[in-house]
Image (spheres, rainbow, N blue to C red):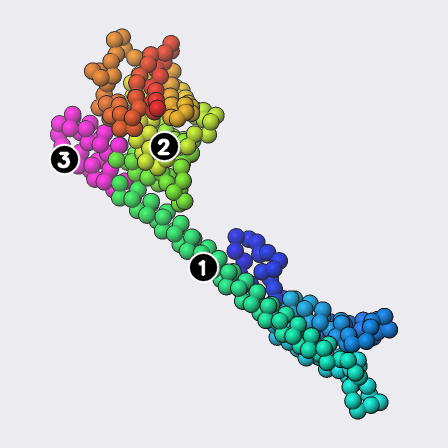
Amino acid sequence: MTQVDGEVRWPEKLPLLEDRPWLQLGLTLAITGIALLIRLAIGNMLPPGLPYATFLPGVIVTAFLFGVRPGLLAAVLGGILGWVFFIKDPLHDAPLPGVAPSIFLYLSAGTLVLLLFHWMQTVTHGLIAQRERNHRLAETRTLLFHELQHRVSNNLQVAAGLLALQKRHVGDPAAQAALDEAARRVGTIGRISRQLYRSDGGARGVRALLAPLAGDVIAADGKPVALAIEDPDALELAPDAAVPVALIVAEAVANAIEHGFGGREGGRIVIRCRRREPGFAIEIEDDGQGLPPGFDITRHASLGLHIAATLAGQLGGRFEMVPRPGGTLARLAVP
């Protein structure tokens, strides 16, 4: 019996001792012998014409526990013992009167029991085999799914590396900066793709998606920035919304490090996730130097923040930068 998911139900273990036929034979003989002893013990309490009163239950127990073949053996032995001890009088040549209905009932019931157990065990084995095939197919699907994720991510990382190499052949500092930004964004998409989807196609938890991504952005800069993620509602994102949301958060974190902590050794960034039925809101707050006076995201923002605003619009939401005492708040609100 193959074990699936660490658990095998009791009926699925039947028939027992298939790999130990001699033990099956011994137990079958023992059950038949017990049926004979019980029949001898209660013989005076039974009315005439019930020679197989205890042998038929023995057949049922044997077929249930050990299968049809041991059950057939128990039926044959019970028929012989019932005939010898309770039907044919050893002192007379003719059988005892009134036993024909009992013989017919024993044969009919025994045959029906064996056929029924044979059908049940065949169906059970078929269901177990089908479940094991489904389990193997699910494992294969999950393996292929993760392999596809890694291949897509690796290809994007290669593309980011090629952009970084191309920078060596460009002399214009502005062009070099643009290639650096493009390589960073492609690399960010590659990191997102590794953890974007679950193998069952379900929604992805925001904390599980944003924590490693924001950590990678911080690590790439090298500044000692403390990161905290608050997700009291255990917000989840559908796969089609996860990529733009992750990119928006990555841009906001990179902007906080580059501009909010510019000229400083580090700081603190807090990402707050809130559910707002039917949508959600994600806030990225830093304790940096804040926004310059008169800042307007539509006129003064960097390319990264313009991309974040565009992605928010594709989600049907809004991305904004709000000054806070002692820092800046970037907010993504999706209705």
Ranked by sequence position, the earlier of labels 2 and 3 is: 3
Residues 272 and 134: in front is 134
Q: Residues within 10 Å of mark 1 (few under 14, many from 20)?
A: few
Is 39 left or right of 118, judged from the image as shown?
right
Q: Which residues are magenta?
A: 157-185
**Figure label count:** 3
Quarter of the image holding residue 260?
top left
* x and y percentages locating residue 185 in the rendered image: 26, 32
Q: Main secondary structure of the magenta part?
A: helix
Please identify, in this view, whether the residue under mark 3 or under mark 1 is nearer the observer: 1
Ranked by sequence position, the earlier of labels 3 and 1 is: 1
Q: In the image, what residue occupies the spot 58% across and 56% down?
A: 8
Rendered image: mark on residue 133: 1
Ranked by sequence position, the earlier of labels 1 and 2 is: 1
Do labels 2 and 3 touch, CB within 8 Å?
no
| Cα distance in 3D space between marks 2 and 3 | 30 Å
Rendered image: mark on residue 169: 3
Rendered image: mark on residue 213: 2
* x and y percentages locating residue 314 in the rendered image: 26, 28
Three-letter code, disc 2: Leu
